[in-house]
Image (cartoon, helix red, strand yellow):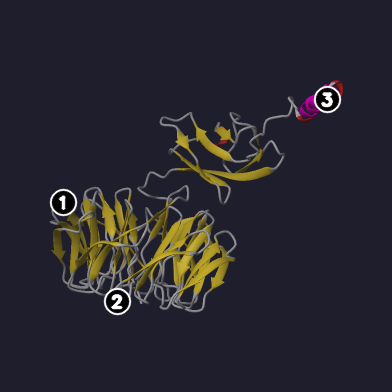
Amino acid sequence: MIRTLSTSLLRLACLVLLVVACTKPDDPMPTNAGNSIESFVFTGFNPTIAGVVDSVAHTIHATVPVGTDLTKLVPTIAVSLNAVVTPASGVAQNFSNPISYTVTGADNKSQAYIVSVSVASPVTNAGTFVYIGNGIGNFFALDGGTGAVKWRVSTGSAISASAFVSAGMVFTGTENGNLFAFDARTGTQRWKYSAGKGILSSPVVSGTLVFAGSEDQVLYALDAMTGSLRWKFGTAGGITSSPVVVDGSVYFGSQDRTLYALEAATGKQRWKFSAGDKITSSPAVVGGLIYVGTDDYNLYALDASMGTIRWKFSTGGRVTSSPTVADGVVYVGSDDYNLYALDAITGAGKWKFSTGGRVTSSPTVANGLVYIGSEDNTLYALNTNTGTQRWKYGTGAGISSSPLVYNGLVYFGGQDSGFYCLNATSGVFWWRVPLDAKIGASPCLANTNVVGFTAGISGGQQ
C-alpha cells in the first residue's frame, strides 16, 4: 500500500512539473503585423478632405479646393495596428510634388505609398479623365471639363470594348485580341495580354484580378498589376458579353446561348443557365437577382445564387442592350426600337418609350432621368417614373455607345466619330470632339483622384 501511495505521489509530482514546464505566463499575445494606410485625411477643410487609398497600387490621391497652398498641408494618417508611418501623421508637408510615405508593421515589413494632391479647377469636371476608344484603334483620354485631348495611344486595331479604371490604370480591349493596361494619367503602357481572337467584351477589375471575355470563346482572369494569367474558362461560343463580379462570383454570357456563374478567385463553375439564343448583352446583378438580355427577344431575371428563372419579359426584337437597375426598376433596350421599364421583382411592364431605331445602347439612370441612345441618331433623356421625354439631342449617325453621367454632364460617343458632352438636366450642348472614326464603345471617367465611373456597358457590339 505504501508502495502504491508512493507511486501515486510520484506520478502527481511529474504531472505538476509537466504543467509548470508547459505554462508560459509571459508569452506575448499575437500582434497585428499589418503595414497599410487605412485613411489619409486633411482636417483643415470643411468638410474634411479624405484621400482615396488604393490598396492594390499603393497610391493615395486627394483633391483640395481652388486656391489651396499645397506647400503647407497637414495630413492625419491612420495605419494598421502597431504600425508606424514615416513621415509622421500631423506633420506639415509640401505636396507640390508626390510624396512617399512608408508604413512599417510590427514584423518590421514595410510598404511605401505614393501620395499625390491636386487643386480643383473652377471649370465643371475639369481635370477629370474621360476614356474612349474608336473604330481605327485610337484610345483617348479627354479632359472632362473641356474635351481637350490629354493623351492618345494607337492600339493597332478597332476598339469596341469600353474602358475600366482601377489601381491607377485604365484597361481596354481591341478587336485583334489584345487587352491593354495603360497608366491612367499618362497613357504609358503598363502591360499587354494577347488572347486568341478579338476582345469586344469590356474588362472589369475586382480585387487584384481583371476579367475579360474574347471571341476565342474564353473568359480570362489576369493579374491586374502584371497582366499574367491567373486562370481561364472555356465556353462553346464567342464572348462579347462583359463580365460582372458580385460577392465572389463572376457572371457573363456567351454566344453558346449560356449565362455562366464562376468562382471569381478560381474560375470554378458554380452554375450555368441555357437561354434560347446567343447572349451578347452584359448582365446586371442587384438584390440577389441577375438580369440579362438575349437574342431570343427576352430579358431574364435569374436567382443569382442558383441560376433559376424568376421571370422573363418578351420584347419584339433581340435584346443586346445591357440592363440597368435603379430604385426597383430595370431598364433595357431592344432591337424593336423600344426602351422598356419593368418592375425589377416581378417583371411587370411599367412603361415603354419608342424611338426611331434599334436600341443597342445601354441605359444610364441619374437624377430622376434615364438616358439612352438609339440608332435613330438621337440621345434621349426620359422621366424615370413615366417614360415621358424630357429632352433629346440629335447627332449625325446612330448611337450605340452608352451614356455616362457625372457631376451634371452627360458624355457619349457617336457613330459620326464625334464624342459629345451635354448638360445632363437640359440637354444643352457643352462640347463635341471629333475622334477620327466611329465610336461604338462606351466612355469611362476617372475623377481627379483617379477613381473610375463607368457607363452602362453596350451589349452586342460584333
Taking the image as shown, residue 346 lies to the left or right of residue 271, namely left
* Above or below 1: residue 375: below
Q: Point out residue 336 in the picture as x, y percentages from the top left corner.
A: 18, 72
Whichever of labels 2 and 3 marks the residue nearer the N terminus, that label is 3
**Which dot marks residue 4?**
3
Residue in front for this viewpoint, 213 or 421: 213
Based on the picture, tell me whether residue 11 belongs to the magenta stretch: yes
Marks 1, 3: nearer the viewer: 3
| Residue at mark 1 | 385
Q: Point out residue 54 in the picture as x, y percentages from the top left corner.
A: 53, 47
At x 65%, y 44%, the residue is 111
Q: CA distance from mark 1 to mark 3?
A: 91 Å
* Above or below 435: residue 119: above
* Above or below 88: residue 184: below
Q: Dot 3: what SS? A: helix
Q: Point out residue 44 in the picture as x, y percentages from the top left corner.
A: 48, 28
What range of the chain is rendered magenta? 5-20
| Residue at mark 2 | 277
Residue in front for this viewpoint, 114 or 368: 368
Q: Dot 2: what SS? A: loop
Q: Dot 1: what SS? A: loop
Q: Amino acid at mark 1?
A: Asn
Based on the picture, tell me whether residue 210 belongs to the magenta stretch: no
